[in-house]
Amino acid sequence: MSKKSSPKAPAKAAPEKAPAKPHAPEFLVELIDARSPTGHEFEAQAVVDSYMRPVADEYAKDTIGNRIATLNPKGDVTVMFAGHIDEIALTVSYIDDKGFVYFDFLGGHDNIIPSGRRVTILTKHGDVLGVTGKRAVHLMSPEDRRKVPERHEMWIDIGVKNRAEAEQIVRIGDPIVYRESFEFLRGTLGIARAFDDKAGAYIVMEALRRLAADKKTLAAKVVSVATTQEEIGVRGAQVAAQGVQPHVAIAVDVTHATDHPDADNRKFGRFTLSGGPVIGRGPNLNPLVVDRMIAAAERLGIPYQIQCEPRPTGTDARAIQMAGPGVACGLLSIPLRYMHTPGEIVDLAVVEQCVQLLVEFTKSLKKGERFDW
């Protein structure tokens, strides 16, 4: 009799590898988490100081709070990169008899955003926790429920009993920020309170850091500026451009990703979150600079998107272009969803592409080159 062979046990499937965790540069995360309301950019300034002083050939600050890092100061063509470190915020404007704190806006706000959020009031005595309040839905009439509250109909509850107690803790003019910080959403998509425009400030500074590793080959003098008070009228950029007097400049900011459900592309254009850096075209932007930026992206094989800018842009480029005898400007933007909310989203892969593009653009500049046309 022949012996039957016993059946083989099925081979065990190899365990699936866990997907690699996405990486966020420490410099970027520290900038994002720094609280820097417009006009009160102290924490972001300190982050920039710590990363840029060691690598810059020259490093300076000015009376409006800009941070100015210079590489290769004897270079012949001066290129300036600008990204703003201020963020939209609130500020204490009034304290009532019961100690409830009322606020005004620093920068552009949608009135639907502030209610029911935890906030931090930045005071000379330290952080003060508060909650933004408004009348609860249960206490509203049907008509009231359909209204967006006016700013003066919202307040901050800091848990005190009266105005005297509140005034021992906070002062009129103290800045206020939302208590959200950086985290990953999925893959390389990040969520943060202030990607507008800490992402841009990181890009201009990180580009200089990388250029510093091979500065002997540079023809250009490179000046990266972390600008202040952009959210209330591009004020820091105006001062910086007058001081630096660049021949060419690129402002780096965010723009609207229009790949969410209610964005009409016919009105706002088509810009995808992960579709690559956005290069602006229009009268605020020098056409020779725009072409050079596009050529740099194509040499690197970086995908890019083009945005029509038919008038002065809402970025630092608006002020820089008109400084002194005029500056040849470009605008590089990071696509962003949900601008001016505590839940802004960007793709960190695109942030990295922007850094690479600025580095390549700078390396293409030649001694004596100007962008007159």
Image (cartoon, rainbow, N blue to C red):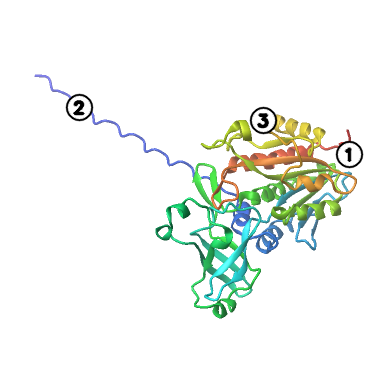
Taking depth in this image into account, of 84 and 360 the one nearest to the observer is 84
Residue type at mark 3 is Gly
- The image's mark for residue 301 is 3
Residue that extends furthest to the left in the rendered view of this protein = 1
Q: Which mark is residue 7?
A: 2
- Frontmost residue, 296 versus 64: 64
Q: Residue at x 54, y 50 (%)?
A: 343
- Can residue 212 be seen from the camera position used here? no
Looking at the image, tell me whether mark 2 or mark 1 is earlier in sequence order: 2
Q: Which residue is identified by label 1?
A: 367
- At 42% across and 39% down in the image, what residue appears? 17
**Marks 2 and 3, how far apart in space?**
54 Å
Residue type highlighted by circle 1? Lys
Classify mark 3: residues with Cα within 10 Å, few (<14), some (14-19) or many (20+).
few
Dot 3 or dot 1: first in sequence order is: 3
- Could you say which is closer to the camera, residue 3 or residue 327? 327
* Residue 32 in the image, given as x and y percentages of width and height: 60, 54
Query: Horizontal and vertical percent for residue 191?
Result: 54, 49
